[in-house]
Image (tube, rainbow, N blue to C red):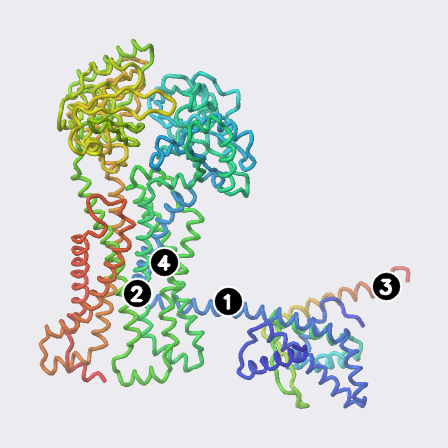
Amino acid sequence: MALLKGTLDVLVLKTLSWGPMHGVEITTWLESRSDGKIDVTDAALLQALHRLEERELIAAEWAITDHGRRARYYRLTSAGRARLRAESTALIDHVKTLTAILTARSAET
Amino acid sequence: MSPQRDRDRDAFRAGVRRLFKLPLFTRAAARADADAELDAFLAERIDRLVLSGLTPADARAEALRRLGSPEGDARLVLRRSAQRRQRHQWLRQAAADLREDLRIAVRRFAHSPAFTATALLTLAFGIGANTAIFSAVHGLLLAPLAFPNGNRIVMPMQENDRYRGDSRFERRNMAGALIEAWQQRTHTVEDIAAASEDMFSLDADGTIDTLTSAVVTVNFLPMLGVEPLVGRGFSPGDVVRHGPPNVAVISEALWRQSYAGRSDIVGRTVTLDGRPLAIIGVAPAGLNIPLSHKTPPDMWVPGALTDAVDGGTGSLDISPSVFALLRPGVSVDVASRELESIAAGVPHAAGLGGRLRVMRAQDFVNAGETRALEVLFAAVGALLLTACATVANLLLARAWTRQREFAIRGALGAGRRRLARQVLTESMSLALAGGLLGIGVAGLTLRVIVALRPPGLDRLADVHIEPAVLLWTLVVSVLTGLSFGCAPAFFAGLHPVGDVLRREMRGGSAGVISRRVRSTLVVLQIAASLALLVASGLLVRSFAALQRMPLGFEPRGLLYADVLIAGTREQRGTIRDEIIRHLQSLRDVTGVSIGVMPGKGWLGGGVEAEIDPEGHTADVPALGTIMMSPGYLRVARIPLLAGRLPDSTSFSSLGPAGWSSEVLVNRALARRLWPAGRAIGAHLREKPFPGRPPAPWSTVVGVTSDTRIPGESGDVAAYQVYTIDRLVSEVPFVVRTTMSGDDAAPIVKRAITAVDPHIFARPILSGDTYLRDGLAPTRFAMSLLTAFGVVALALAAIGLSGVIAYSVSQRTREIGIRLALGADPSRVVRHVVSGGLGLVALGIALGAAAALAATRALSSMLYGVGAADPPTFVAIALLVGAIALVASYVPARRALRIDPAETLRAD
């Protein structure tokens, strides 16, 4: 499933609201939560992470993974948390409106 | 270097930075970080895929597939975003640091208001004086021609053969034929215009005034790029050949003053020397050429370009200046060569002789009385130096007391760089705040300067603090902040923590380096203030000498009126005699004569003289000629040193050319031509013009004293010939009154114009005014230099007393012990003071050397005193020494109040 424009950022923020994760963990989490329906390329995800970091919505730090590898771990900043709240509310409203319109039954059926 | 090694190196550097928890400072580090992240991501992905059962090769293929784009592309994109992120973070960090530093700085300044106020005031004065003088320098020297094409205007000039070898007498006369040849053939010059100047009496709505006016060719205003503010410029139809002009463009200043800036100005009539003129336009402010007068013209009238050499057939025949507009990108040299080669082909121009010279109009303006400004510019530089030294000293004193703070902050992890930046931020914010205050000080200083300005620098009144000047202030403030901030910044990072804290514990005397730096600064301050005061001292002595200068005549109460008389020769003669009678009848007038103000003269051609009975001749290239009536010497009170006055009938024998058959010479000319003292009875005549018959010889019948006006160029008055006058159309009068010249001028003017309505008296000039104006440039430079010098000395005294106070506070224990052991208190004070006196002596010696080097530049402004005048140097050195002694004695006395028991208990 292709993502709606601009929703990847909020999904990443949501993912990180569960705790600090590195790139592979984030994409794995998204995949499992969407039953594999969300399909984001790894390159796009990494870019999104950089973009969010530049806006200081998330912060990064190098650390060691469970498998003993080094990885760049991302965590939500307080600005990111606030943004997540605002964006997800707006997005949910938006989706509700779309759903209402698209599921309305026309008069003749 | 291979990409792989490149990457390895970056990764290594990034690793080192991570190890020390440093932020990613460089683009390369950001790039390495992005690479490392991608590599780690892929490795993790592959690990997981292998765990889920894929072979390593398949896992790798799958990982790359999931990446979504070729690995190389993905890597590039990530590097770019990482670098952008790094730049962003760096800026954010820098801004945050700056905010923090500023917050600390402001808090700290608020904590020590006395220090802050002293530093700010010092800086405001230093920067303010600098800004004010730079405004003047900028307005007068750097951008004097404030109209669109100002920087492309050049002035071709021709040296006159008659004055060859004497560059002071270069003329700007130019043959009309030559100008026309240039106009037709040039490729380097866009346009050529000519202008000549004169003074007129203007009758505008009943008020008679005198103004500077210029006759210009029709293309003059468009060539300069000047558009009239109101109305129109000249058109070819405005030129009246063989007659006076009938239209005029007036200056913005005249429009505002005499017509209150009325919008219906166009079409109004003014009367210029009795002729009606219609005003057709108003020129914008800043149009200050032609340039031969010190004040910008008030009015421009159109004239035809005529042949100046042939005597002129139209209006532009009085020494016209030629102005040419260079094509964009053409250098003065190139244009000069081209104009020269064209001139070589014009026969008439060759007849005039002389070498052609092309000069930028801007440089021509600057050739005038700008020495005072240059000197003042150097002086404010010295003042700013002492201001910097003062503030650096204050900051160093604080830096020392803050060493403990820095040491502790350093121990807590603040880097040297960070601490130095904190100190620099403080200095910078101090300097910029000082600069801001300085703009206010500059405004006030500029007002004082304008009020004090000498007549030669009248253009100063138009000087304002402009954007370019504010930019200068900013640059000066930043440089100032850097210069006085560097020393403390250096010290902030200098001392290892342990040292400082240990030293504190011991309470010993510390800060040898800091004290040395502060002492050096004090020496600099003393030297700079001494140099400034020596310069002002020399000017004070010059001023006194100028006031005592033997003038050779009595200027006070002497008036000079230049009168134009219309009518036939006989009518004019009658009116002239009538004016004399009328003036003599005035109650306060004791004498009237024909002649110009002594010391002014009319600079004429050279003279040729028989210098011995054998008929050998000698010549003098140029001299002043005074046309006079026999009463002249009595009215002007010029002593006749030898011989007798010329016979008043002696001119009639000569015909229209040449001087009267009997003349007087001044003593300087007599000594130059006849050193053996046989002037009386000798013959001389005007040096022959090329291609004209020589004038008849005249006989010297008497020798007068030399006359001079202070401040006037000595060239005119150095050598004088006095000859009986036979002019009737433009007659100079000198009038001796019992009143001051200023009071008498209007009375004399009314008396002259009352004789006949067709008389136009140019402004009445009084000897008193000449005297005052002659002294003005010296008084101007003297007042400002003295003010700067006094401020600098005060700053030096503050600096010195700070250093002494500091040394007393550092040596409290030592002094306490001495006193406890029974030392004589006065000896202790002497001991402390003598430490300061070494600095003073060094400062005075250095300052004297600097002054010796610098005052040479002043020598053209000095009169009656040498640039290395020993009494001035000694007096100023004593003054500085005395002030320094007081400045060190006051804090030294504090040593006496030290209680020995107290100091020993303190530890």
- Local packing at callout 3 (Cα closer than 10 Å; few below 14, some 14-19, many 20+) is few
Question: At label 4, which amino acid type do we have?
Answer: Gly
Instruction: Please report, as a chain letter, where disc 1 is located.
Output: B
**Who comes first in sequence, dot 2 or dot 4?**
2
- Nearest the viewer among B880 and B129 is B880
Question: In 3D space, how far apart are the residues under numbered discs 3 and 4 (Cα atoms)?
Answer: 75 Å
- Cβ–Cβ under 8 Å for marks 2 and 1: no
Res. B514 visible in picture: yes
Residue under pointer 4: B434
Question: At label 3, which amino acid type do we have?
Answer: Arg
Q: Residue at x 81, y 90 (%)?
A: B53
Instruction: Please report, as a chain letter, where disc 4 is located.
Output: B
Question: In 3D space, how far apart are the residues under numbered discs 3 and 2 (Cα atoms)?
Answer: 81 Å
Determine whether, in the image, residue B74 is placed left or right of residue B819.
right
Question: In 3D space, how far apart are the residues under numbered discs 2 and 1 (Cα atoms)?
Answer: 27 Å
Image coordinates of residue B128 in percent, x first then y, are 34, 53
Q: Which mark is residue B95?
A: 1
Q: Quadrant of residue A31?
A: bottom right
Residue under pointer 3: A105
Q: Residue at x 10, y 75 (%)?
A: B825
Question: At label 1, which amino acid type do we have?
Answer: Ala
Question: In 3D space, how far apart are the residues under numbered discs 2 and 4 (Cα atoms)?
Answer: 13 Å
Question: In 3D space, how far apart are the residues under numbered discs 1 and 4 (Cα atoms)?
Answer: 23 Å
Question: At label 2, which amino acid type do we have?
Answer: Phe
Residue under pointer 2: B115
- Cβ–Cβ under 8 Å for marks 1 and 3: no
